[in-house]
């Protein structure tokens, strides 16, 4: 099923029937800068779920590797890095040992390194295990590239967000500007197109829409409108599940 960039005709909030859902894992996948993180945070707040920022987890590993000069093609070096890694999520913040690296992981240098680190099967196995462990402790909204396909193939509800490369480049530029790091739009657009190709070609954890994921085109939609659409879908799913259980 696909949803276009038409906003819902009436504004809807996540009512109690949605917040009381028995769903425990909702995944949001999609390419870089498609709006996953912003929407996932808002949806988690609406539902009272924990927000799992898997991208931040990969970025934190990449930052640790940069600091140690890790060769991502050397399995021994990657193994040693992961064995000594103390990576923790505390609320919306991410830590390496006792250091809050929530801002440090957002630099262009770390962004580039993350794409390389994410190609390592060892890194992916390490983080998949952590993500699944977190899901055993709380109901989660999780976003990334392979959450609905590899990490949580049995998720209760799956979304796949898309947007044009141009719109995603504009969003990424605005993100860097908010951090006080202006970047060139054409350069960002080129990097996004290259990132898309790498993500699709990954040998493990490639960017693929799960067959049962609902695709939402976020071009022209505000984050609030995307969340409203998701709430409507989840509410309908809840009603369908309730009706099946009471037949």
Image: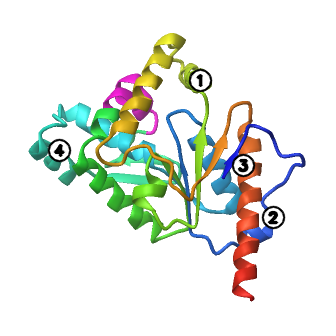
Q: Which comes sooner in the sequence, label 3 or label 1? A: 1
Residue identifier under label 4: 78
Between the C-alphas of marks 3 and 2, the distance is 13 Å
Residue drawn 55% across the image and 22% down it: 169
| Left or right, 114 with reference to 37 | left
User: Alpha-carbon neighbours of circle 3 within 10 Å: few (<14), some, or many (≥20)?
Assistant: many
Main secondary structure type of the part rendered in magenta: helix
> In front of the other: label 3 or label 1?
3
Q: Is residue 202 above or below residue 244?
A: above
Residue 184 visible here: no
Q: Secondary structure at mark 1?
A: helix
Residue identifier under label 1: 178
Residue drawn 74% across the image and 89% down it: 247
Between the C-alphas of marks 1 and 2, the distance is 33 Å
Q: Position of residue 7 (x, y in %)?
A: 81, 41
Residue 112 magenta-highlighted: yes
Assess whether mark 1 and mark 3 are in contact (beta carbons under 8 angstroms): no
Q: Secondary structure at mark 3?
A: helix
Q: Secondary structure at mark 4?
A: helix
Between the C-alphas of marks 4 and 3, the distance is 38 Å
Assess whether mark 4 and mark 2 are in contact (beta carbons under 8 angstroms): no
Q: Tell which of 97 and 54 is nearer to you.
A: 54
Q: Which comes sooner in the sequence, label 1 or label 4? A: 4
Q: Which comes sooner in the sequence, label 4 or label 3? A: 4
Numbered range of the magenta stretch: 102-113
Q: Is residue 24 above or below residue 44?
A: below
Q: Secondary structure at mark 2?
A: loop
| Left or right, 229 with reference to 203 | right
Between the C-alphas of marks 1 and 4, the distance is 33 Å
């Amino acid at each position: 099923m696909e949803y276009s960039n038409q906003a819902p005709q009436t504004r809807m909030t996540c009512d109690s029937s949605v917040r009381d859902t028995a769903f425990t894992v909702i995944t949001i996948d999609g390419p870089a800068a498609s709006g996953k993180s912003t929407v996932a945070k808002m949806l988690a707040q609406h539902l009272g779920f924990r927000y799992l920022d898997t991208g931040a987890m990969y970025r934190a590993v990449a930052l640790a590797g940069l600091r140690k000069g890790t060769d991502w093609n050397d399995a021994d070096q990657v193994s040693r890095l992961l064995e000594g890694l103390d990576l923790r999520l505390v609320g919306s913040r991410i830590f390496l040992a006792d250091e809050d690296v929530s801002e440090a992981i957002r630099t262009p240098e770390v962004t580039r390194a993350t794409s390389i680190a994410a190609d390592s099967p060892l890194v992916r196995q390490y983080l998949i295990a952590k993500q699944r462990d977190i899901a055993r402790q709380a109901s989660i909204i999780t976003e990334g590239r392979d959450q609905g396909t590899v990490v949580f193939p049995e998720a209760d509800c799956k979304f796949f967000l898309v947007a044009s490369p141009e719109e995603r480049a504009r969003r990424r530029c605005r993100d860097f500007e908010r951090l006080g790091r202006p970047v060139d739009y054409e350069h960002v657009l080129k990097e996004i197109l290259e990132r898309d190709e790498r993500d699709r070609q990954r040998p493990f954890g490639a960017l693929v829409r799960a067959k049962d994921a609902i695709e939402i085109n976020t071009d022209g939609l505000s984050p609030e409108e995307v969340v409203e659409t998701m709430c409507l879908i989840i509410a309908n799913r809840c009603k369908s599940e309730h009706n099946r259980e009471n037949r």
